[in-house]
Amino acid sequence: SLPDIDALRLTLGPFMTTDGYALTDGAQVTVTANFVSGPPVTGTAWVLDGEVSLLLPITASSPVLRLTVASPLGPMDLTPDWHAAIAAEASTRATP
């Protein structure tokens, strides 16, 4: 979480094929965050060394219902558990 700019740096991966190979560099990945209220936020990035990294306008206090990741490997929904880790990180940084 980057509270100074109300954003979240999100790194996902590795994106692996069923044969155990990393997805090709340059493959497009789209991430959509759906919230309790308000419009969804979508970001697009490209695979590098099996991972993608995005900067999304999401704060630690934004209740995310679902993250959907679309890649050449197909769509995938992530559970809200990832959001708890972000909130914990933000509270750790806030304490001296």
Image (cartoon, rainbow, N blue to C red):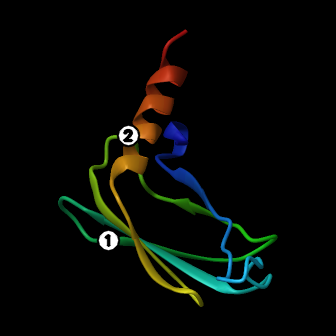
Q: Residue furthest left?
A: 37
Farthest residue, direction front: 19
Residue 11 position in % (x across, y down): 62, 58
Question: For this view, does 23 lie left or right of residue 75?
Answer: right
Q: Amino acid at mark 1?
A: Pro
Q: Please give the name of the residue rendered at 43% of the width and 76% of the height, measured from the top-left corner.
A: 76
Q: Secondary structure at mark 2?
A: helix
The percent coordinates of residue 85 (x first, y second) are 45, 39
On screen, residue 57 above or below 24: above
Amino acid at circle 2: Ala
Q: Nearer the viewer, residue 5 or 10?
A: 10
> Which residue is at the front of the view, 74 or 6?
74
As displayed, is residue 5 above or below residue 79? above
Q: Which label sits on residue 30?
A: none
Q: Earlier in the sequence, mark 1 or mark 2?
A: 1
Label 1: which residue? 40
Q: Residue at x 66, y 73 (%)?
A: 15
Image quarter of the C terminus = top right
Residue 13 picture quarter: bottom right
Residue shown at the point (50%, 31%) measured from the top left: 89
**16 left or right of 60?**
right
Residue 61, position in %: x, y? 32, 41
How many tags in the picture? 2
Q: Residue at x 79, y 72 (%)?
A: 48
Q: According to the image, label 2 marks what residue?
A: 84
